[in-house]
Amino acid sequence: MANIRARSAGWLFGSLMIFVSSCPAAAATAEQVAAGAAGKPWWFWPIILFFFCLVLGILAVMAGVGGGVLYVPLVSGFFPFHIDFVRGVGLMVALAGALAAGPGLLRRNLANLRLALPVALIASTFSILGAMLGLYLSALNPDIIQTCLGATIVGIAILLLLSKNTEKPVVNKQDAIGLALGLGGAYWDDGARESVEWKTHRTLLGMCMFILVGLVAGMFGLGAGWANVPVLNLLMGAPLKVSVATSKFLLSITDTSAAWIYMNRGCVIPLIAVPSIVGLMLGSLIGVKILAVAKPKMIRYIVIAVLFFAGLKALDKGLGLGLLG
Amino acid sequence: MNTQNKEDLQPSQEQIIYANLLVIGVWAGIVILVATYAIYVTGILPAHVDMSLIPQLWGKGVSEYLEMTHSPHGWGWAALLSKGDFLNYIGFAFLALMTIFCYLVLVRGYSRQKDWIYAAIAVVEIVVLSVAASGILGSGGH
């Protein structure tokens, strides 16, 4: 039985690899479909979007990034939706994924409430400001947001490529704020068969960074796992597993406040939103299964390449160059 | 492994309650989303904005879209729940309200432990999320 499961997962993984290898081409195909499907019935788009998001969900899990960071640049670049709606739905997608992942991470004590709560307060407050600023700029000229989004996505791709997260950072002395807030804990590492105790340092600087994280998350509807992890791990000294899990949980709080701003503004169209949310969540569940037989490192590099491509496409669109079609 | 170490490895009581609430909330939210979407696309309830019209309008900015479809902003959708498209907002709002519900439980837990710093952080977060949800900010008309 286990053998059959492994073989099925292997087949699924093989098929996925073929798709992933041609992902920019697949995205370009989506764009061609978009260009040639103006006269298609209304149900055509939700179906295309559902399957597109299903694949995005699988990729996101395997590359260790949130759904929003792939959803917003790819869908805004290759689908006919206005960026206002893409950002609104992007936040709902990231929020739903984070809410779904939260319980497992909290129960295993990987996501830490004491670490999450103070930084979530900062990030969620500033994500409101980011959302309002993003909607204001978009109303002035959507190309401004598209260009800034492109530059941000290229920056994220570079960050993912260059950042060397540390499994268990050494924190010799905890700072006063970290001590006062009790930012520390322990978790069981299955791989190393040992309990790992941890504490934070540079807490104030880390908290200040979450101002920027919140602003960017709200402005572009991206979620912010790509930024949370380096701040928690490299700057504040939390172990990588705790950083990744706490980051995922954090998104459920940060994205909630920004999602409300977009939702109240009318940026969530149900016809687009529900297939996106359900597709990405199902994709994430499949991704977790495939992860057992996949080579996540390779997928990660492919996703970074896709992000580069999506970022350049957004820049191209925002600046009106027309170099990428 | 001694008893103290084992205790350190266990999630706090608040974490467990938070996780349990999330599980129920997320699955309820997904069921609501799928059910209301099915009602919408099958036409059981009439839509406020005709589905065949939406692909012609989703390339426009949100202000223009709202104006052309006479759609409300803020919590205006609550008055249009008899329309299939706005019925979906129940699921969106439910998911987006989950965090506020969970934080209410945290406030009670931290207050009982007399952990006033974290109780205060949780209260302020509820205020921030409630302000965002209220529509006071950024739901400006068109």
Image (spheres, coloured by chain):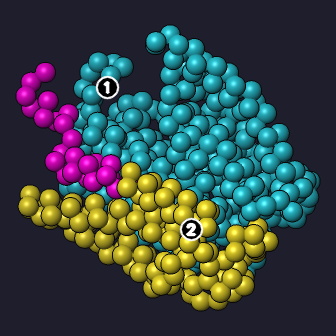
Chain colours: A cyan, B yellow
Q: Residues within 10 Å of mark 2 (few under 14, many from 20)?
A: few
Camera-side residue of A86 and B32: B32
Residue A149: x and y in percent read 69, 60
Camera-side residue of A196 and B51: B51
**Residue A171 position (above or below residue A76):** above
- Asked if the residue at tag 1 contacts the one at tag 2, i.e. Cβ–Cβ closer than 8 Å, the answer is no
Image quadrant in which you'd find residue A144: bottom right
Amino acid carrying mark 1 in the image:
Asp
User: According to the image, label 1 marks what residue?
Assistant: A189
- Determine if residue A22 is in view: yes
Amino acid carrying mark 2 in the image:
Ile
Residue A146: x and y in percent read 74, 64
Chain letter of the residue beneath label 1 in the structure image: A
Which span of residues is magenta-colored?
B1-26
Q: CA distance from mark 2 to mark 1?
A: 51 Å
User: According to the image, label 2 marks what residue?
Assistant: B44
A307 left or right, relative to A232: right
Residue A97: x and y in percent read 48, 49
